[in-house]
């Protein structure tokens, strides 16, 4: 029941940069192709590799990237041509490990009109409504994946190393005036009151 998202960004050359690919039906795929040819596929971490292989089968020319630290796990499923860190500068999409976190995944600053979109996978969730049934109970009380925007309990188990450093980073981000949105792997995109939501995430730590 946990919703998943992928992010698609048109690169300056017209090709598509696809982060955390999800298998879709032909109608949706046709819409994606109308934006441009898929050229770069980012597999963001060891768990978000589920549908990467079907995209590579559909588009053999895809240039597959992943974080350096996750490469051994990801290449059990799909071979990466290079790491995100090595290609970030050339693609104009800065990336890095969130301060205070283990090198589990990267954040990306994708250029958008008037600023950047902050793209993550599991670092922050934005599923405010609690889901029903046993899956909903598990997500609410065990992993704390639903509720206020921020890092879930599962995220803290997997990736948090120093909560104070991550909190300081989030507060620094909240003072920037160029972050237009936060795009997460699970839940709704944050497109309003971005600074406030970043402060809320810092408070949740």
Image: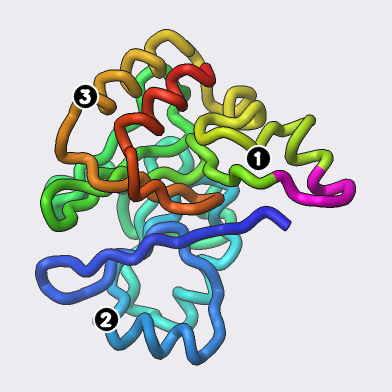
Residue extent of the magenta highlight? 130-136
Label for residue 35?
A: 2
Q: Secondary structure at mark 3?
A: loop
Mark closer to the chain start, 2 or 3? 2
- Residue at 30%, 43% (x, y): give it: 118
**Residue 139 appears anywhere in the view:** yes
Residue 132 magenta: yes
Judge by depth and name the residue closer to the eye, 97 or 165.
Answer: 165
Q: Quadrant of residue 59?
A: bottom left
Q: Secondary structure at mark 1?
A: loop
What crowding class fits label 2: few (fewer than 14 Cα within 10 Å), some (14-19), or many (20 or more)? some
Judge by depth and name the residue closer to the eye, 92 or 1.
Answer: 1
**Residue 90 appears anywhere in the view:** no
Mark closer to the chain start, 1 or 2? 2
Q: Which residue is mark 1?
A: 146
Mark closer to the chain start, 1 or 3? 1
In this picture, residue 52 sits left or right of residue 133: left
> Gap in Å between the C-alphas at discs 2 and 3?
33 Å
In this picture, residue 161 sits left or right of residue 87: right
- Provide residue 102's location: percent of width, then percent of height: 47, 23
In the image, residue 142 sits, relative to residue 21, either above or below, namely: above
> Gap in Å between the C-alphas at discs 1 and 2?
32 Å
């Amino acid at each position: 029941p946990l919703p998943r998202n992928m992010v698609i960004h048109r690169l300056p050359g017209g090709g598509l940069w696809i982060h955390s690919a999800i298998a879709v039906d032909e109608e949706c795929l046709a819409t994606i192709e109308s934006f441009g040819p898929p050229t770069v596929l980012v597999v963001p971490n060891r768990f978000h590799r589920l549908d990467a292989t079907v995209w590579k089968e559909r588009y053999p020319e895809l240039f597959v990237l992943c974080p350096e630290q996750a490469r051994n796990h990801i290449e059990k499923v799909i071979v990466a041509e290079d790491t995100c860190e090595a290609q970030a500068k050339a693609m104009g999409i800065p990336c890095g490990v969130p301060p205070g976190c283990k090198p589990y995944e990267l954040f990306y600053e994708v250029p958008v009109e008037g600023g950047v979109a902050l793209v993550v996978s599991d670092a922050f969730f934005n599923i405010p409504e609690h889901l029903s049934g046993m899956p909903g109970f598990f997500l609410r009380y065990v992993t704390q994946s639903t509720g206020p925007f921020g890092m879930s309990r599962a995220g803290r188990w997997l990736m948090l190393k120093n909560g104070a450093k991550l909190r300081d980073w989030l507060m620094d981000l909240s003072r920037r005036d160029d972050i237009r949105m936060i795009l997460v792997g699970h839940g709704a995109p944050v497109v309003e009151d971005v600074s406030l939501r970043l402060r809320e995430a810092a408070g949740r730590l």
